[in-house]
Amino acid sequence: MDIKVLLDGQEKYYTAYNYVNSDVGLAAGREIWGVPKKFAVLDIKRSFDLVYGFLERPEGLRLVTAVIRPEEPTKIEPLPITRLALKVIPPAGDGAEPLIQLVDRYRHRLTPKSVWTGPCTLVFNNRSDIDPLYRLGPRRIIRCVYGTFDYILDFGRVVKDYSRR
């Protein structure tokens, strides 16, 4: 879940957490980049001329459903990914300070392989105070894109180190 923020006058996205459905997804990027993870049931399926994806947490409690009818292939350039995350590493011993850093994963890249646009629907199915995604419902949908991408986790930088006193 990413939230649009301003950092030193620049628009960025802060990753509050990612939903994952495997141990591999849980481990990837957590320690290095500080991205918290939550286990969930995630899936993307095809049904006739539609593609739909959903998020359930716990299994059976549908929180989000997205449906698109991919109608038109489209070209988009590789996208640089700029995401902020708060990296917190607890101290290893008595009296030690935790490592707390705001990191910018600005060199990650998202390279499109097959991309489509078309009409879509986004529904926040159930209210959950544990995962309050329903509070983020869109005011309007501008454009819908469905595709497959290569995602490369590259180096980033520490924007602010909160552990120094």
Image: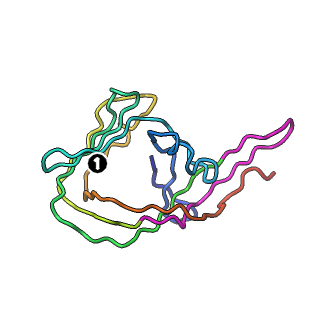
Q: Nearer the viewer, residue 101 or 33?
A: 33
Q: What range of the chain is rendered magenta?
A: 88-110
Disc 1 target residue: 139
Amino acid type for the residue under numbered disc 1: Arg
Tell me where residue 4 sits by quadrant.
bottom left
**Magenta stretch encompasses residue 106:** yes
Q: How many marks?
A: 1
**Magenta stretch encompasses residue 108:** yes
The relative height of residue 76 versus residue 153 in the rendered view (above or below) is below
Residue 155 placed where, x, y %? 60, 65
How is the protein colored in the picture? rainbow
Secondary structure at numbered mark 1: loop
Residue 80 placed where, x, y %? 46, 68
Classify 10 Å Cα crowding around label 1: few (below 14), some (14-19), many (20 and above).
Answer: few
Tell me the residue at 33%/66% (across/down).
113
Q: Is residue 111 left or right of residue 10?
A: left
The relative height of residue 43 versus residue 77 in the rendered view (above or below) is above
Q: Is residue 156 left or right of residue 57?
A: right
Tell me the residue at 41%/62% (across/down).
150
Q: Is residue 6 left or right of residue 53?
A: right
Tell me the residue at 70%/44% (across/down).
89
Residue 60 placed where, x, y %? 33, 26
Residue 20 placed where, x, y %? 46, 41
Q: Nearer the viewer, residue 140 or 103?
A: 103
Q: Is residue 48 left or right of residue 88?
A: left
Outermost residue on the right side: it is 95
Tell me where residue 9 sits by quadrant.
bottom right
Tell me the residue at 57%/45% (across/down).
27
Outermost residue on the left side: it is 48
